[in-house]
Image: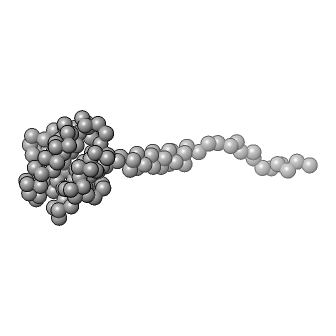
Amino acid sequence: MKLTQGQEIKKARIELVPMIDIMFFLLVFFIFVTLSMVHQKGLNVHLPKSSQGSAIKMHNFVVTLKKNGSIFLNKEKTNFKGLPALLKQRVVNKKDLIVINGDEGIYLKRVVKTINIIKKDGFLRVSIAVNPTT
């Protein structure tokens, strides 16, 4: 006895629309994962604007000066007295670039004091972060 009598046998086929949906979902997923892997070393501050600013390729250390008086090396909170010891502990190569990332409204005195601390310890490269203007 045949069970398929009177019924059509359909061939299996691969549906492309759900496969395309899955591929787009994977693409979006990998884009978001990649964007979240970008490691920001400094904290968010309102940088001053400058028309002479230029992009730097690579920096490993960011000293952040907040408007409320707090100081951070990368994202680790410190103060002016603890900054030299923290720099010596974290920065192995004296030729590494140290970027000063400061709020727009901080006093110049704090920036100069920070540069003096960094230079006194023998670090050779110091830069100040700015927002470029057009």
Q: State the image coordinates of residue 15 (x, y, percent, origin top left).
A: 59, 45
Relative to 40, 124 lies left or right: left
Residue sitting at 7 percent across and 53 percent down?
108
Q: State the image coordinates of residue 49 (x, y, percent, origin top left).
A: 11, 49
Q: State the image coordinates of residue 69 (x, y, percent, origin top left).
A: 17, 62
* Residue 44 visible within the image: no
Of all residues, the one furthest to the right in this rendering is: 1
Q: Quadrant of residue 68?
A: bottom left
Residue in the foreground of this view, choosing between 36 and 28: 36
- Residue 20 in the image: above or below residue 69: above
- Residue 5 in the image: above or below residue 124: below
Residue sitting at 68 percent across and 43 percent down?
12
Of all residues, the one furthest to the bottom in this rendering is: 68
Relative to 112, 82 lies left or right: right
* Residue 68 visible within the image: yes
Residue in the foreground of this view, choosing between 12 and 25: 25
In this figure, which colouring scheme has been used for the structure?
A: one colour
Relative to 27, 89 lies left or right: left
Residue sitting at 13 percent across and 47 percent down?
116
Label count reads 0
Q: Quadrant of the C terminus?
A: top left
Q: State the image coordinates of residue 107 (x, y, percent, origin top left).
A: 8, 57
